[in-house]
């Protein structure tokens, strides 16, 4: 069985949000056009407490984009985004929610960073893996943003756990568009399949 996993379709990642990705609306339109082709559609949301240690605002004299050692690991600092129950954490109103079978969250521990849709924090499952195993799903399609973080690390975890992993390239967006080809090439070299949505939408 196959499932589509969506991530990043929250207002803070779309144009006008705190981590605005200019092409985000294009990815949204693309994924709406092909969601119905999947029998199982799953969504993962960032769901951060306001005091998350990766937010630059929670560290004196620090700015987004800088790095610092937190809990013994080098961590990139971000603008505040997808704070629990905030406007920016809401899903895009254009997203076809009736096609989504189940939603998972990640990043709820203020002391830990997690980019992969498989984990709430490193080593702590958010239930996605167990859901896939229970439904006997062995092939995953990934779509969303940011490509450099959520899609990239979710794909690596997917491949490492033996899932056939396909990236819908025209339904994924990078924070820095110049990174797209490099990231996709890395994923392809590790075993991910790269396809455009027209391969899914065709009759």
Image (tube, grey):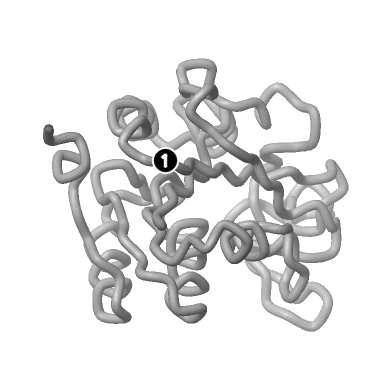
Q: Residue at x 77, y 69 (%)?
A: 124
Drawn side of residue 25 relative to residue 112, left or right: left
Location of mark 1 (residue)? 39
Residue 110: percent from left, percent from top: 85, 56
Identified at 40% across, 55% down, the residue is 2
Give the residue displayed 84% in from the left and 41% down from the top.
Answer: 50
The correct choice, above or below, for 48 with respect to 32 in the image is: below
Image quarter (top left, top right, bottom left or bottom right) of the C terminus: top left
Q: Is residue 137 left or right of residue 133?
A: left
Residue 190 in sight here: yes
Q: Is residue 58 left or right of residue 184?
A: right
What is the x, y in percent for residue 34?
29, 33
In the rendering, at what x and y percent does residue 97 appear? Answer: 54, 24
Work out whether residue 174 or residue 199 is closer to the camera in this orientation and state it: 199
Tell me where residue 162 appears, x and y as whole percent: 45, 79
Q: Is residue 162 left or right of residue 83?
A: left
Q: Quadrant of the N terminus?
A: bottom left
Residue at (48% x, 61% y) in the render: 137
The part of the image, by quadrant, that contains residue 111 is: bottom right
Of the pair 140 and 175, the residue shown nearer to us: 140
Query: Which of the pair 40/119 is nearer the observer?
Result: 40
Q: Residue extending furthest top?
A: 93
| 70, above or below 85, in the image | below
Vertical arrangement, residue 23 with respect to residue 119, above or below? above
Dividing the picture into quarters, in which one does residue 114 lie?
Answer: bottom right
Please, what secondary structure does the residue beneath circle 1 have?
Answer: loop
């Amino acid at each position: 069985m196959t499932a589509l996993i969506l991530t990043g379709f929250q207002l803070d990642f779309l144009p006008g949000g705190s981590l605005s990705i200019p092409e985000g609306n294009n990815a949204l339109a693309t994924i709406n056009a092909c969601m119905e082709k999947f029998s199982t559609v799953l969504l993962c949301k960032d769901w951060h407490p306001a005091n998350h240690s990766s937010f630059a605002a929670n560290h004196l004299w620090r700015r987004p984009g800088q790095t610092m050692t937190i809990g013994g690991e080098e961590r990139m600092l971000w603008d505040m985004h997808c704070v629990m129950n905030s406007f920016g954490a809401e899903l895009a109103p254009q997203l076809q929610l009736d096609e989504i079978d189940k939603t998972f969250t990640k990043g709820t521990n203020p002391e830990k960073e997690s980019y992969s849709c498989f984990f709430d924090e490193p080593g702590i499952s958010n239930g996605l893996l167990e859901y896939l195993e229970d439904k006997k799903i062995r092939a995953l399609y990934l779509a969303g943003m940011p490509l450099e973080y959520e899609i990239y690390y979710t794909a690596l975890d997917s491949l490492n756990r033996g899932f056939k992993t396909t990236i819908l390239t025209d339904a994924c967006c990078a924070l820095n568009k110049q990174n797209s080809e490099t990231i996709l090439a890395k994923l392809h070299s590790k075993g991910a399949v790269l396809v455009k949505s027209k391969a899914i939408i065709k009759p």
